[in-house]
Amino acid sequence: MKLIEYNARFGDPEAMNVLPIISSDFVETCWRIIDGNLRGVNFESKATVCKYIVPEGYPDSPKKGIIKVGKISSDARLYYASVDHQTDGLHLSSSRALAIVGIASTLAEAEAIAEKNCSKIEGPVMHRSDIGTEALVKKRVEHMKRLKA
């Protein structure tokens, strides 16, 4: 077995996908992490998809500007990342600005929720609409199979 990547930052999609569906007490879960024993940590049986909102031109020449965040649906979570709240509004920096996580019973439903809520962010922004789609997931699985062979 090989470790490809180890990520434990709460600001990364790997954490943002998991945290909203932990049904165990979060503080107790943190203590279990410290103890190295995650037995007893429970998760809702849900699918999640995280999509990042980034400045137009990201990553090579990101545009800065003001963004407006509309009402996010209750089946999604909004995480603020690289933004700055000033008196005239929410300003983009040059990195990932917001993350939206869709939560549903299936991956397709979670992707649709995340995608719908991405449209509620106004300003000089963009996002990858292919993240979490069946086509991209199949492509990534096939790539991993080729690597494993």
Image (tube, helix red, strand yellow):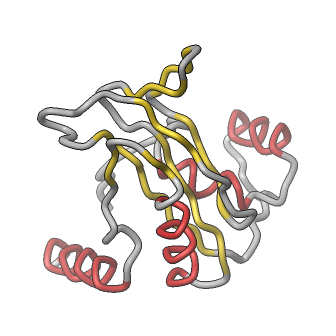
Instruction: Count numbered badges in the picture.
Output: 0
62 or 145: nearer the eye?
Answer: 62
Q: Residue at x 72, y 61 (%)?
A: 21
Q: Which quarter of the rendered picture does the N terminus lie within?
A: bottom left
32 or 14: nearer the eye?
Answer: 14
Q: Is residue 125 left or right of residue 30?
A: left
Task: Tell me where residue 39 appears, x and y as whole percent.
Answer: 76, 58
149 or 75: nearer the eye?
Answer: 75
Q: Quadrant of residue 72?
A: bottom right
Task: Tell me where residue 7 appears, x and y as whole percent.
Answer: 43, 42
134 or 3: nearer the eye?
Answer: 134
Q: Residue at x 30, y 39 (%)?
A: 55
Q: Which residue is most to the front?
A: 88
Q: Which quarter of the rendered picture does the C terminus lie within?
A: bottom left
Task: Tell me where residue 108 appears, x and y as whole percent.
Answer: 50, 84
Q: Quadrant of residue 97?
A: top left
Compared to 139, does 75 lie above or below? above
Q: Which residue is most to the top?
A: 87
Task: Tell me where residue 65 appears, x and y as whole percent.
Answer: 35, 29
Q: Residue at x 68, y 75 (%)?
A: 46
Q: Residue at x 56, y 48 (%)?
A: 15
Compared to 133, does 87 lie above or below? above
Q: Is residue 42 left or right of residue 106?
A: right
Compared to 88, does 39 lie above or below? below
Q: Is residue 148 left or right of residue 73?
A: left
